[in-house]
Image: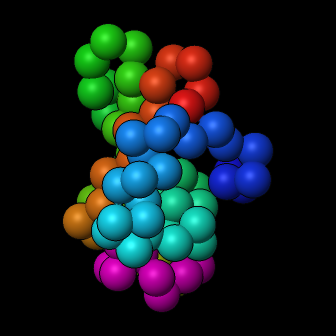
Amino acid sequence: MNTSKLHFSNHAAIRKQQRGISTQAIDCILQYGDCFNAGCGCISHLITGKSIKEFSHLTSDLRLHRNIAIVEANDGS
Protein backbone atom coordinates (compact mmCIF):
# COMPACT_ATOMS: atom_id res chain seq x y z
CA MET A 1 0.00 0.00 0.00
CA ASN A 2 1.27 3.47 -0.82
CA THR A 3 0.84 6.15 1.86
CA SER A 4 0.25 8.81 -0.81
CA LYS A 5 -3.24 7.31 -1.14
CA LEU A 6 -3.92 7.39 2.61
CA HIS A 7 -5.68 10.11 4.54
CA PHE A 8 -4.08 10.88 7.89
CA SER A 9 -6.27 12.32 10.62
CA ASN A 10 -4.90 15.40 12.37
CA HIS A 11 -4.11 13.23 15.39
CA ALA A 12 -2.20 10.71 13.25
CA ALA A 13 -0.26 13.42 11.41
CA ILE A 14 0.81 15.03 14.70
CA ARG A 15 1.84 11.70 16.27
CA LYS A 16 3.70 10.67 13.11
CA GLN A 17 5.71 13.89 13.24
CA GLN A 18 6.28 13.79 17.03
CA ARG A 19 7.53 10.20 16.90
CA GLY A 20 9.59 10.61 13.73
CA ILE A 21 7.76 7.86 11.87
CA SER A 22 8.61 7.94 8.18
CA THR A 23 6.22 7.27 5.33
CA GLN A 24 8.51 4.37 4.38
CA ALA A 25 7.96 2.84 7.83
CA ILE A 26 4.20 3.15 7.43
CA ASP A 27 4.34 1.59 3.95
CA CYS A 28 6.39 -1.31 5.33
CA ILE A 29 4.02 -1.90 8.26
CA LEU A 30 0.92 -1.78 6.06
CA GLN A 31 2.46 -4.09 3.48
CA TYR A 32 4.08 -6.71 5.74
CA GLY A 33 2.44 -6.32 9.14
CA ASP A 34 -0.25 -8.49 10.67
CA CYS A 35 -3.77 -7.08 11.03
CA PHE A 36 -5.83 -7.16 14.19
CA ASN A 37 -9.29 -5.90 15.09
CA ALA A 38 -8.78 -2.70 17.09
CA GLY A 39 -12.49 -2.22 17.88
CA CYS A 40 -15.06 0.26 16.59
CA GLY A 41 -14.43 -0.88 13.00
CA CYS A 42 -10.72 -0.05 13.15
CA ILE A 43 -7.84 -2.29 12.10
CA SER A 44 -4.43 -2.27 13.78
CA HIS A 45 -1.38 -3.10 11.65
CA LEU A 46 1.71 -4.37 13.48
CA ILE A 47 5.03 -5.97 12.67
CA THR A 48 5.05 -9.13 14.78
CA GLY A 49 7.51 -11.98 15.18
CA LYS A 50 5.38 -13.90 12.71
CA SER A 51 5.66 -11.17 10.06
CA ILE A 52 9.41 -10.91 10.62
CA LYS A 53 9.83 -14.66 10.08
CA GLU A 54 7.56 -14.66 7.04
CA PHE A 55 8.89 -11.57 5.23
CA SER A 56 12.44 -10.92 6.49
CA HIS A 57 13.86 -12.35 3.26
CA LEU A 58 12.10 -9.52 1.36
CA THR A 59 13.15 -6.55 3.46
CA SER A 60 15.56 -5.90 6.30
CA ASP A 61 13.50 -3.02 7.74
CA LEU A 62 10.92 -5.10 9.59
CA ARG A 63 12.75 -5.30 12.92
CA LEU A 64 13.15 -1.50 12.92
CA HIS A 65 9.38 -1.03 12.86
CA ARG A 66 8.36 -3.70 15.37
CA ASN A 67 7.08 -1.29 18.05
CA ILE A 68 4.93 0.85 15.78
CA ALA A 69 1.17 0.32 15.45
CA ILE A 70 -0.80 1.83 12.60
CA VAL A 71 -4.52 2.10 13.34
CA GLU A 72 -6.74 2.39 10.28
CA ALA A 73 -10.28 3.66 10.75
CA ASN A 74 -13.14 2.25 8.72
CA ASP A 75 -13.31 5.55 6.81
CA GLY A 76 -9.74 5.01 5.54
CA SER A 77 -8.04 7.52 7.85
Say if residue 52 shows up in the picture.
no
Name the residue: 47% across, 25% down: 73
Q: Residue 58: give x, y in percent of width and height.
A: 58, 79
Count every numbered label the image shows and give the total.
Answer: 0
Residue 59 drawn at (x, y percent): 55, 81
Q: Give residue 9's position: percent from left, percent from top.
A: 51, 36
Who is closer to the viewer here, 42 or 11? 11
Relative horizontal placement of residue 27, taking residue 35 as reference (left or right): right
- Decide if residue 69 is on the left or right side of residue 26: left
Q: Nearer the viewer, residue 25 or 8?
A: 8
In the rendered structure, which segment of residues is drawn in magenta? 58-65
58 shown above or below 5 = below
Identity of the residue drawn at 43% across and 45% down: 12
Which residue appears at 58% of the width and 66% of the height? Answer: 23
Q: Is residue 71 magenta?
A: no
Q: Is residue 60 magenta?
A: yes
Can you tell which quarter of the image residue 68 is in?
Answer: bottom left
| Residue 38 in view in this figure | yes
User: Measured from the top left, where is residue 16 in percent x and y?
Assistant: 42, 60
Coloring scheme used? rainbow
Toward which corner of the image does residue 28 lie, by quadrant?
bottom right
Q: Quarter of the image containing the C terminus?
A: top right
Q: Residue at x 32, y 68 (%)?
A: 19
Check the image and report above or below for 55 versus 70.
below
Q: Nearer the viewer, residue 50 or 64?
A: 64
